[in-house]
Amino acid sequence: MIIKKYIVNNMSEAVTRIRYELGKDAVIISQRKIRKKGFTGLFSKKVMEVTAAVDNGTKNDKKIENKKNTTSRPMEDSLAAIKKAMDKHSDNSKLSVEKIENTDITKASVEDYNNPKIKTEREDDLISEMREMKTMLSSMASNGGNLFNGKSELYKNLRNYDLKENLVEEIISRVSLDKSDIDESEKIKKVLGHMINVAEVKDNGVMVLVGPTGVGKTTTIAKLAGRFALIEKKKVGLITVDTYRIGAVDQLRTYADIMNIPFKVVFSIKDMEAAVDSMKDCDVVLVDTTGRSSKNKMQISELRAFIDKTHSDNLHLVMSCTTKNSDIKSIVEGYEVLNYNNIIITKLDETTTYGSMLNILNEAQKPLSYVSVGQNVPDDIKRLDINEIINLVTGVDSIC
Ligand SMILES: Nc1nc2c(ncn2[C@@H]2O[C@H](COP(=O)(O)OP(=O)(O)OP(=O)(O)O)[C@@H](O)[C@H]2O)c(=O)[nH]1
Ligand SMILES: [Mg+2]
């Protein structure tokens, strides 16, 4: 049996060559269009690969030169012989002649990659797989990686309120533990409610404000002084240890003058006790301090020495709700040494999301005493209850 492949330009060329080389008994067992191998790749000319076979009457394959010895046999015999030979020669011994004729892909070789039909099929498969993946990804994204299927709006939006990621996770896990019948959004509010503490107002004795630079300590002191003196008709005294920033003393003195309340500047630690003493007859004494970086331990220690002399147990850490989430922790930790009792959050009017309020309160684990909502003295200061805080944090309410 002789089997031979011919790469030709067309079938008539194939027939001529097969007749000449294999004789008139040769049969064509497969034909297909291919591209010529080589550098030109996809752009090379299409040619035909024709496989022909002839039984030369021996058990072993003979060389083509033996073609003259081939004897004429009926077509049926030839086909049976070809089938047997193909079974033996085929890479896949199970393949029959018919299979080889009909499924050229089973004999895929390197040049098959240049076969436009196969190539197109593969590209189509790839494109449809990519489409499927794209649809899958976009549907996952639109429902939060399937996490949010059937979830409430509040749950879906938790990540949009500027809450710290660990806080969102904590809320989600606490909500999942709540097996009561109430709505999921109610469960979330319940969890938030447990995370928020509101301070009892202590509007007598010595009240000290500390915090980073520029957060609004002095303005808040002026607002509180106005509130206590003008609205609550209390006797108020003002002390400042803010001797560091040029103009800082004048800022508070101006407010004290307008409200007609006593005002003292403390220059050294030993002066503090005397200053507080001198205001013994006041219902409330408000102490303003220099803004310090929470990273500067020396400055914080110096501040502590001043505060210790006030003997106050009403110390408020003032933080702006515009503080970066990543900075909240270091500020809270930096001021921890002062043992502050409450938190005041300022500049609520400067933001549209209030998640940072919860981030601050949760980090500090201290109750909220006041919020500042603008620059106007004395009006822009408020006390908020837990529901009002939840409504701000969850975007139900806003400060205009
Ligand atoms: N928008 C807005 N601005 C505020 C608020 N509170 C204070 N400010 C402004 O923030 C700026 C700084 O306020 P100060 O009261 O001087 O801040 P401070 O913490 O005393 O600053 P230092 O003494 O330098 O540490 C001022 O321009 C205030 O008017 C607020 O609630 N909202
Ligand atoms: Mg100040």
Image: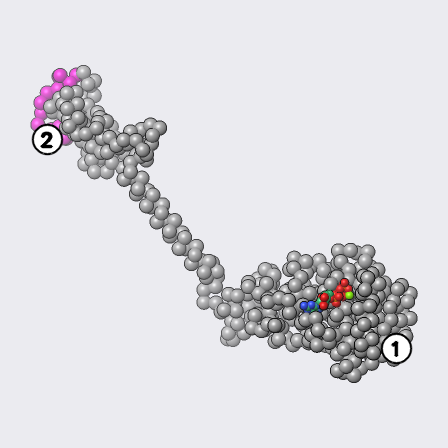
Q: Is residue 35 magenta?
A: no
User: Is residue 82 shown above or below 399?
Assistant: above
Classify mark 2: residues with Cα within 10 Å, few (<14), some (14-19) or many (20+): few
Q: Is residue 217 above or below residue 262?
A: above
* Residue 47 at least partly seen: yes
List the residue tagged with mark 1. Answer: 280
For the point 46% across and 58% down, the residue is 141
Real-space Cα separation, disc 1 to disc 2, in angstroms: 125 Å
Q: Quadrant of residue 170?
A: bottom right
Q: Quadrant of residue 51?
A: top left
Of residues 375 and 312, the one nearer the viewer is: 375
Q: Which residue is mark 2?
A: 76
- Report the residue at 77% width, 62% height from top: 291
Query: On the picture, is 154 further left or further right than 88?
Result: right
Residue 202 x %, y % = 76, 77
Picture quadrant of ligand 2: bottom right
Q: Is residue 340 visible?
A: no
The segment highlighted magenta reads 66-80
Q: Amino acid at mark 1?
A: Lys
Q: Judge by depth and name the residue closer to the eye, 360 or 274.
A: 274
Q: How is the structure coloured here?
A: one colour
Element at label 2 = helix
Q: Residue at x 80, y 65 (%)?
A: 248
Q: How far from the left and from the top, in percent, is residue 34? A: 26, 32
Which disc is residue 247 wearing? none
Q: Viewed as shown, does residue 237 lie left or right of 183?
A: right
Residue 6 or residue 98, whichever sits in front: 6
- Quarter that holds the N terminus: top left
Q: Nearer the viewer, mark 1 or mark 2?
A: 1
Front position in the image: 13 or 88: 13
Q: Amino acid at mark 2?
A: Glu
